Amino acid sequence: MENSRQTDLTNVRSTMLVSSYFGNRLYCLLLVALGLVSFWALPAQGGVEFVTPTNTCNHVDQIGDHKDLFIMAGQNVRFRVFGNSVDLTDRHSGFRIANDSGDGADTNARIIKQGTDCGGTGFALVEVDSPANLSSDIQRSLFFKMPFGDESRLQMTIRDFPPIDVRWDSHQDIGSCLGSFTLLNQSKTLEIRLPPGHQQDETNCDSRTANATIRPAPMSELDISRRSNYSVDGLPNFVSSEQAHPMPPDISANIEFPIDIAGIRALNATSNSILTFAMVSNQISKLRLRVVPNISNGFTQPPNCRNLITGELVNTNDQVGCQFSLAFPPPSGGQRVSFVVTDKECVARSEGLPAGVQVEYSSATGQGHVILPTATGTVFDIPILRALGGQTSQGFPCASLTGVQVTVGFWFGEEDEPNPDRQDTFRIRRSQ
């Protein structure tokens, strides 16, 4: 009886051991199975990691930095998306764009090509199209399909173009051959006043370019930009516009306005033009260009001062004659032309003047004037000065074997402005 009880206990222990063994094995197998199921159920690791422009490896957006990728609105905006398995994405059916927020503006995206770069990481070159004239920023997401069927998401903010402000530059490359210019209305208006006689003037004019600067409003953040030219509408037919390079919409741009000299000189009435600047039609700025003609008499070319025999190189004690070309014949009583000589003590008033010609000159001030006589013609050759030797008021010689240059500035009429209307030079030569 006792032996039978011991046998039963032994069998029970054996059964428990066997059950424990197989139970633990089954538990482990269940854990492994559950782990495999969990493994296959988890999203594939990797996906989008960072974004760069098309031509550098600089990271402009990093996944996990808790911000969107900011791109500029418009067509064909490109950037590269890097990450594990991104280069395996089906570029035709495994890629999509979704509307997150903002108006329902039509946006599209496509993968242009795929490859590896920046340390051997796979990338997809993405191109996004969106309307350039957004009313505000919009948000979109790009989804890249991964090898195991799940998706990797890249969130974007598509930025509206900023407002722009355009002003005429304070420095303009407009010379005296086009008269004078004035900036008005906080540099929103450029006024050009043409000189007298401009309609008959056929001389060259190298300084003939107006300049304006476009300044966009600051943008808080922009990762991917695009370069474009500004359009300029409303130009008069004697002005064109040139922009050296396409510019991003968040960077200031300079625009030059070459002036057609013959066209602007031909004006016989005031020209008022409103210039409209824009990169997109919902962000514009305007400037005014006013050109005021002067159809009164004036120089048609700079006075040409020289000696009738020796030319621009004048010997001491010889006469210095100047040729004056006017738009119209002088009025009754003659036409006054004022002049100033820089080296005032190097010349004196001319002697033996033609009948009817009046010349006055002061070596103390360097100022003088000539009265052109009434005539039917418009070209006059008048000896107004006589070259001297000796010393200038600054203590330098007035003449040399090769000639010392003397500058004369001329005003049509009175000396009414600091800068002369025209100027010319000649040189004084001593004999030995």
Image (tube, rainbow, N blue to C red):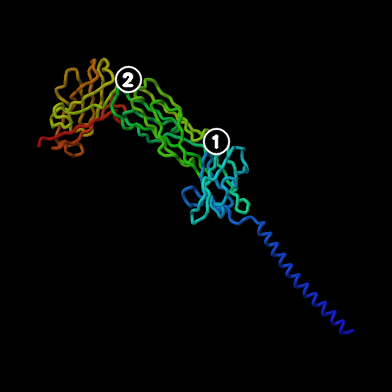
Answer left or right for 88 relative to 235.
right
Label 2 or label 1, whichever comes before in sequence order: 1
Q: Secondary structure at mark 2?
A: loop
Answer left or right for 102 relative to 327.
right
Inspect this view and state whether residue 365 appears: no
Residue 154: x and y in percent read 58, 49
Q: Along the line of sight, which residue is nearer the eye, 102 or 114?
A: 114
Q: How many marks?
A: 2
Could you classify mark 2 by the number of other residues whose Cα lies within 10 Å: few (under 14), some (14-19), or many (20 or more)? few
Residue 249: x and y in percent read 49, 40
Name of the residue lying farthest toward the right: 1
Circle number at residue 296: 2
Q: Amino acid at mark 2?
A: Ser
Residue 409: x and y in percent read 25, 30
- Name the residue rendered at 38%, 24% in the picture: 292
- Name the residue rendered at 52%, 55% in the picture: 121
Could you classify mark 1 by the number of other residues whose Cα lies within 10 Å: few (under 14), some (14-19), or many (20 or more)? some
Residue 225: x and y in percent read 50, 43
Q: Which residue is mark 1?
A: 133
- Name the residue rendered at 37%, 31% in the picture: 258
Tell me the CA gap for discs 2 and 1: 49 Å
Q: Amino acid at mark 1?
A: Asn
Q: Quadrant of the C terminus?
A: top left
Q: Along the line of sight, which residue is nearer the eye, 408 or 179?
A: 179
Residues at badges 2 and 1 in contact (C-beta under 8 Å)?
A: no
Q: Quadrant of the N terminus?
A: bottom right
Q: Along the line of sight, which residue is nearer the eye, 228 or 222?
A: 228
